[in-house]
Amino acid sequence: MVDLRTTTTLALARAVVRAHALLGDPAAQLFGRSARRDPYPVYERVRASGTLPGSRLGVRITASHRVCSQLVRDQRFGTVPASALSPADSTVHVDGRRLVNPVEESFLSRNPPEHTRLRKLVAPFFTPRALRGQTPVVEHVVEEFLDEIGDRPTFDLIGDFAARVPVRVITDLLGVPDADHASFARWGAALVGALDGVRTAGEMRALHEGLREFDAFLTDLVEQRGRTPGDDVVSALVAVDDLAADDLIATTELLLVAGFETTVNLIGNAARAVMAHDDVRAKLLDDPAYAEAVVEETLRFDPPVQYTARSPLERVEVEGVELAPDTPVVLLLAAANRDPEVFAEPRRFDPGRSDGREHLAFSAGIHYCLGANLARMEAAAALRGLFRRYPRLRIDGRVRMRPSGIIRGAARVPVRA
Ligand code: HEM
C-alpha cells in the first residue's frame, strides 16, 4: 500500500519541480511532464546555457557529446540509482522479504567489481557470434505477427506489432515458456515508469504491483530451470554456484525489461520516421537492406533511451567545473546525438549520413548496451517485414506518446495499411 506520507512527499516534490520549471530551470523542465511530447527544445535550451550547467534540483546536466562520451568512460564516475532522482522510497516488501528492483540492483546500476562479475556471466549470450543464427528466427517471429494482422485495414503499430516482436525474442532467449505478452507489457511499463524516479502515488502502486508479480513469476521460472535446465540464459545463471538469489533475479529481470521496453520504441520510432519521409520509404522499398541505415539513424535522431546519469566517486573537475562526490550529472544522450560539433545538420533525419555511427544511443564504456547487436538486428528485421507487407502504411489517428522522460516512444500509433 502507498501511505499518505509518500503521497504527500511525491505531491510536494512535483510542485517544487513545476515551480523551478516555470522559472526556467532546464533540468526541472526535463523532469516535468511538459517536455514529454517533444523534449528536443528543452535539450537545446540546456545546450545554450553552457557545457555543464547546474540546476536548483541539485544536479548538473549536459547536452554535450564530448562530456557525455567522457563521463560514461571515466572510471572516476559511477552509476546513479533512479532513487537518487526520486523523493520517495520505492522499496517493496512481501511477507517480510524485500523484493529485488532490477533497475536499482542489477549490473546496469552497479559499479566494478560487482558490475564486471555479473555482466561477464551473461555477455556470451549476446556476442555477434552467439546471435548469428538468430536472424532467421527473428524474421519468422516478425512474419508470424504480420500474418496475425493480415488484411485488417487499420491496426495499432505498437500494440499489434512493435511491442510483440521484442517480448517474444527476449523471452525465447531467456527460456521463458509461454510468455504472456500482456503481463510482460504491464510489468515492463511499471519498472520503466520507475526509471524516471517515481513521481505519483499511482506510479508507486504500479511499481509495487509489477515488482510483486514479476518476482513471483521469476521465482517459479528459476525453480523450473533448476529442475530441468535448457541451453538458455536463466539455466546458465541457475548453474552458477556462488550467485546470490537476488543477483540472479535482478539480472534476469534486467535482461527481460531492457530487452523489450527499449526495442519496441526503436521499431516504433523508426517506422514513424519512415512514414514521415517519402524518400526514405522509397529507398527502403527499393532495397530492404537499407533498413539497417534507417535503424541507425533512428538511434541517433530519436533514441529510445534519452538520458542516463553518473556521479563522481571522488572530487573531480570537468570542463572547469568542480564536482563534489555523489553530485548527479544527467547525461542527455539524445541531445549529444544532435550536437552540431559532431553531426552535420543534426536536426535532419538522414540515413545516408557519414557521421551517424558517432551516436551515443547505446551509451559507451563499461555499461555499453549489452543488447545493441540484438536490438539493431530485431529492429531492421521488423522494418523490412512491415514495409514489405504494407508498403503504403500511414498514420491514421492520434499518436499517444509514453509518459516517460528517459524512455522515448509512442504508446499507440493507429495506422492504415
Ligand atoms: C533499442 C534498443 C536499446 C537501447 C536504445 C538500449 C540502450 C541502452 C543504454 C543507453 C544502456 C546504458 C545505460 C548507461 O550507460 O547508463 C544500456 C544498457 C544495457 N542494455 Fe540496452 N538498449 C537497447 C536494447 C537492449 C536489449 C535488446 C537488451 C537485451 C538484453 C539490452 C540489455 C542491456 C543491458 C543488460 C544493459 C546494462 C549493461 C551494463 O550495465 O553493463 N538492451 N542499454
Image (cartoon, helix red, strand yellow):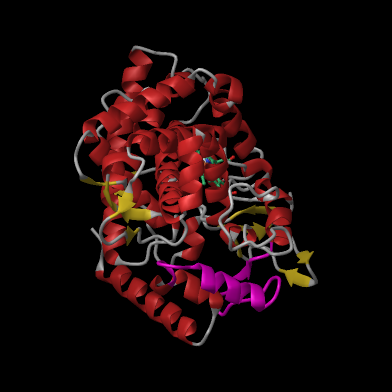
Region of the chain picked out in magenta, as a range:
35-64
The answer to which quarter of the image holds residue 46 is bottom right
Is residue 36 inside the magenta stretch? yes
> Which residue ends up furthest to the bottom in the rendered image?
23
The answer to which quarter of the image holds residue 185 is top left
Q: Is residue 246 left or right of residue 349?
A: left
Q: Quadrant of the C terminus?
A: top left
**Residue 238 in sight from this viewpoint:** no
Residue at horizontal 65 percent and vertical 72 percent from the top: 47
In the depicted view, which residue is nearer to us: 413 or 17? 413
Residue 297 in the image: above or below residue 141: below
In the depicted view, which residue is nearer to us: 343 or 66? 343
Residue at horizontal 29 percent and vertical 23 percent from the top: 177
Q: Is residue 207 left or right of residue 279?
A: left
In the depicted view, which residue is nearer to us: 40 or 110? 40
Residue 110 in the image: above or below residue 3: above
Is residue 26 inside the magenta stretch? no
In the depicted view, which residue is nearer to us: 376 or 251? 376
On the image, the x and y values in percent for residue 183 come to: 25, 40
How many labels, in total?
Answer: 0
On the image, the x and y values in percent for residue 379 come to: 46, 38
Q: Is residue 309 left or right of residue 74?
A: left
On the image, the x and y values in percent for residue 333 come to: 59, 57
Residue at horizontal 59 percent and vertical 25 percent from the top: 127
On the image, the x and y values in percent for residue 383 come to: 43, 38
Q: Quadrant of the N terminus?
A: bottom left
**Residue 409 in sight from this viewpoint:** yes
